Image (tube, helix red, strand yellow):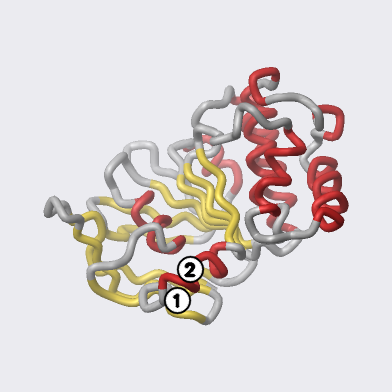
Amino acid sequence: MIRLQNVTKIYHNGVKALTDVTLYIRKGEFVFLVGSSGAGKSTLTKLIYREETPSRGQIVFDGKSVSRMRPGLVPYMRRKIGMVFQDFRLLPQKTVTENVAFALEVTGASKREIKRAVPIVLKMVGLTGKADSYPDYLSGGEQQRVSVARAIVNNPILIIADEPTGNLDPETSWDLMKLFLDINRRGTTIVMATHAWDIVDAMKKRVVELSCGKIVRDEQGGAYRHEA
């Protein structure tokens, strides 16, 4: 489903973020990206999403070359990808329903489609009772659940999560991870960059570790290795 072949990324300031990275992720996998700050995790996810382009190498997503894709086709590719960030990125002037609906509106979905889809995903993430609330009246965990609902409302085949538990307390983090597991069981591929070693150790999923822009470990059911 995702293939990076000999990918190198050098930014304009000369910083080499990734060096000769080759990585294959199959449909339906749950993959943790781990490593210290500056290891290249965020750059890798940005390349998959086409927020950045590689300096060298090839990136293929869902059978299409991301690195060679015409700019006009990028928005259509991104409809297949849901993004979840550490800082929630909700629109404060919109209710929970409106924040989730907005993800459909930008793709041109009809009002009928939006009215049908939004309650379904709010129920899935446990926020039916908060549909008319504004972000400022939600806890951090609830805000992150809204961002997850927004990410999945388009039925993406891939979710990229960048430090999704970074602003949450441990109990709330575990509740959120159970939600991600449920989404993954439904067939959605998940790639998650994280520093949460306790979650990585407990979940026994595939772990890809980056260090200085290179993959130094790739194993199924691996631990975080706290000393990394």
Picture residue at 38% right of the left edge, 62% below the top:
47
Image quadrant assignment for residue 44: bottom left
Q: Quadrant of the C terminus?
A: top left
Q: Which residue is labeled 1 in the image?
A: 60
Callout count:
2
Q: Is residue 76 left or right of residue 110?
A: left
In the rendered image, the vertical position of residue 118 relative to residue 173, given as above or below: below
In the rendered image, the vertical position of residue 147 relative to residue 63, given as above or below: above
Picture residue at 62% right of the left edge, 24% below the top:
140
Nearest to the observer: residue 33 or residue 90: 90
Mark 1 or mark 2: whose residue is earlier in sequence: 1
Q: Which residue is labeled 2 in the image?
A: 74
Q: Is residue 123 left or right of residue 39?
A: right
Residue type for callout 2? Val
Work out which residue is located at the far top of the displayed protein and give it: 137
Q: Is residue 130 left or right of residue 39?
A: right
Can the viewer see residue 29 in this picture?
A: no
Residue type for callout 1? Val
Q: Quadrant of the N terminus?
A: bottom right
Nearest to the observer: residue 185 or residue 71: 71
CA distance for labels 1 and 2? 13 Å
Q: Residues within 10 Å of mark 2 (few under 14, many from 20)?
A: some
Can the viewer see residue 195 in this picture?
A: yes
Picture residue at 31% right of the left edge, 58% below the top:
216
